[in-house]
Image (cartoon, helix red, strand yellow):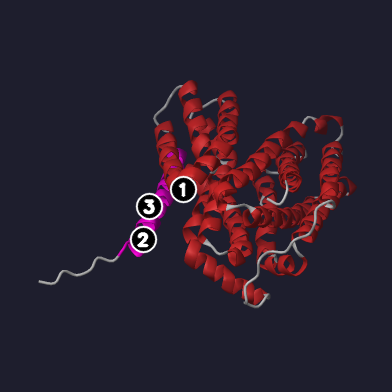
Amino acid sequence: MRTNYHFWVLISIVAISGFSQGMLLPIIAVIFEQDGVSSSLNGLHATALYLGVLLASPFMEVPLKKWGYKPLILAGGFTVIASLMMFPLWKSFTFWFVLRLLIGIGDHMLHFATQTWITSASPKEKRGRNISLYGLFFGIGFACGPFMTPLVETNESLPFIVSSLISLLAWLTVWGLKNEFPESSMETNSFFGSLHRFGNVMKFAWVALLPPFGYGFLEASLNGNFPIYALRSGITVETVSILLPAFAIGGIVFQLPLGMLSDRYGRPFVLLFAMAIGTVSFFSAEFIDSTIGLFIAFFVAGMVVGSTFSLGISYMADLLPKSLLPAGNIMCGMVFSIGSILGPIIGGTVIQWNGSFFFMISGMLFLIFLALAFFQKQQRQEYAPRKKPLHG
C-alpha cells in the first residue's frame, strides 16, 4: 500500500461495515420475532442485503473508473449511515426491507472499492497478508455486531443510532485519503464493456471465484440451517451456541497466518490444503457424538475454511492483469452473495428431506477441491516445456 495510514483507514472502514452487518442480522430477527413475524418471512427479509449486492454489482465498475476509489467509498459509506439512521423513523416490514437493500448496495460499493484498492496497490509478495488483514478486520467487526443486541431491551432504536454514529466516525477518516484510479484497459468503460470484462474474468480466473462462493454458501447455511439441523438431531441449544463461535474464532485466528503462508507457498497449495481439511472436518462431524469432538471439528474447519474468501480474492488478483481487477472484485462479491442465498435454500431442502447437513457441506467443499486440482493440472500442462521429438 502507499502508506500504512492509508491501509489502516481502509481496513478500519471494512471493520465498521462488518460491525453494522453483524448487528443488523440478529437485531432485526429479534425485533420481528417479538412482533410475531413468521420465521420464513424473517429469513426472506435477511436476503435483502445480498439482493442489494447482486443488483448493484453490474453497475459498479464504470463509476469506479470514472471517479476513482475515494468517491465510491464515501458514497457507499454515506448510503449505509443514512440507511441506519432511518430505521427508527418508521417501523415497517417493507420499509426496513428497502433500507436493508440500500445497505447491501452501500456496503458493496464500499467493499468493492476497498478490495480493488488493496489488491491493486499490494505487491504480490504481500498480497495474501494484506487481503487476509482485510478479511480479519471484517470478521472481527462482524463478530462484534451481535453484542449490540441487548440494547434492544432498552430501546429498539438505540442499536441503529449507535451503529450509525460509529460508522460516521470511521467514514470521516476516508476524507483524509488521496484519491486514486484503477488501472484501465483500452476497452470501453460502459455497462456492456463491464459485461465483456466479466466474461474475461470467468475465462481466466473462474477457479478463483469458487472459494468466495463456497464461503458464502457455508457461512449462510451454518448460521441459517445448522441450528435447525442440530435441534432435530438432538444437539442442544447450548451446544449450538458454542459450536458456531468455534468456527468463527478459528477463522479469525488463522486468517492472517494462512494469508502469509499463501504468499510464501502459493495460493493454489494453501487453498487445496484448506478445502481438503475442511472436507474431512465436516465429514467427520457427522459421526461425532461428543460436544468436545464437535467443537474441535468446527474449530479446525474454521481455521482452514474461514479464510477462503480472502484467499480467493488474492488468487483472483494473481491470475488477472490489473486492468481486470475491478471486474474480478465485483464478481467475487457477486458469487459470495449467490452462495449466501443458495446455501440456506439448499440446506433447508436437505434438512427437510432428512439428509445430512454435514455431508452436504463436505460435498460442496470437495467439489471445489476437485475444481482447484483440475485447474492446477491444466496450468501445469499448459506451461510444461515441450519435449522435442526423438529422431532415429
Q: Which mark is residue 266?
A: 1
Where's residue 90, x and y in %?
87, 49
Of the residues shown, which amino acid type is indicated by label 2? Answer: Gln
Q: Does the magenta-highlighted stretch encompass residue 381? A: yes
Q: Which quadrant does the C terminus fall into?
A: bottom left
Which contiguous range is marked in magenta? 357-385
Q: Which mark is residue 373?
A: 3
Report how far apart the C-alphas of labels 1 and 2 lie in the structure: 16 Å
Is 124 rendered above or below residue 236? below
Q: Would you say 155 lies left or right of 307 here? A: right
Is 13 rendered above or below residue 105? above
Is 34 rendered above or below residue 46? above
* Comparing labels 1 and 2, the label whose residue is closer to the camera: 1
Q: Would you say 85 lies left or right of 218 here? A: right
State the SS at label 1. loop
Q: Which mark is residue 378?
A: 2
Of the residues shown, which amino acid type is indicated by label 1? Answer: Gly
